[in-house]
Image: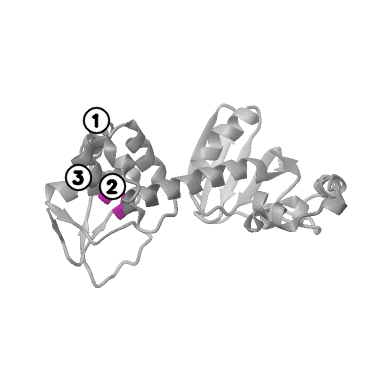
Amino acid sequence: MHTAANLTYRYDGTFAGLLCCVFESYAAHEMPEAIWGPDMPEQSLFEEKEILTDNRHAERVERSIPAKIGNEAEELVRLAFFTTLPDKELTVLRFLRQGYHYGASVLDFAGEDSVHRLREAVKHLLSEAHLLKGFIRFSVQHNVLVTTIGPKNYVLPFLARHFSERYPEEHILIYDETHRMALIYRPYEYGIIPMDAFRAAPPDDEERKFRSLWQTFYDAIEIKPRHNEKCRRNFMPKRYWSYMTEFSRACSKNSVMHV
């Protein structure tokens, strides 16, 4: 294998497409300088190679990961794909190359940059998904529970099961404005679809009443002499506040249902 100087792989942004990049790297005996998805700039100073998604190639790579590196490595790679790790595709490729060479022991290489970066990125992803299960606030509009979130990571697949099990008889729409995707749930089935934009309808009188009640409750349960702003920010990071009803005295776009 040689490093292909100034060579960039371009793929379709899917997990199967990423696995095809891994396949191509081995088939061509080369290591690209970068792997770009469809959202990256269309022109660059680097030579580009378009990697077409071939399910047969993707399946071969997918089967090889648990067989040669272990189930933990497969889970790490799959979860890393949903993170916001810079150059995550290239990091995954480097990790897999190390894993194919050393086997499952690569996961114990604490000093290996690709292992450390993937672990930290996945830790951040799972932490954010966990926090949002508690921070999401729904509004009821036309008998649908709707809300907007702005996560750093692509967390919708990790929220789908939680809310579908918690509210199995409801209709739900969770819009991720960061990634322009929406989780759509109706009883016992859900899908995640692209959505360029979503704006909730203005709250009606009943919605305003419930938001006011939730804000009053939030204020009432605080023990004022023990107010600790640093502690609150640790447990409830400030970047989520704009999506949470209790921090909007003016009845903002999100609502009262605490989940």
Q: Nearer the viewer, mark 3 or mark 2?
A: 2
**Amino acid, disc 3:** Phe
Q: Residues within 10 Å of mark 2 (few under 14, many from 20)?
A: many
Q: Which residues are magenta?
A: 89-95
Q: Quadrant of residue 129?
A: top right
What residue lies at 51% left-to-right and 39% top-to-bottom? Answer: 158
In front: 248, or 113? 113
Please tell me whether residue 94 belongs to the stretch shown in magenta.
yes
Q: Is residue 219 left or right of residue 68?
A: right
Q: Residues within 10 Å of mark 3 (few under 14, many from 20)?
A: many
Q: Which mark is residue 95?
A: 2
Residue 62, x across and y down, in percent: 27, 36
> Which residue is labeled 1 in the image?
67
Q: Is residue 165 visible?
A: yes
Determine the CA span between mark 1 and mark 2. 15 Å
Q: Secondary structure at mark 1?
A: helix
- Are the residues at dot 1 and dot 2 in contact (C-beta closer than 8 Å)? no
Please tell me whether residue 184 belongs to the stretch shown in magenta.
no
What residue lies at 63% left-to-right and 35% top-to-bottom? Answer: 171
In front: 42, or 99? 99
Q: What is the tally of numbered marks visible in this picture?
A: 3
**Amino acid, disc 1:** Ala
Q: Residues within 10 Å of mark 1 (few under 14, many from 20)?
A: some
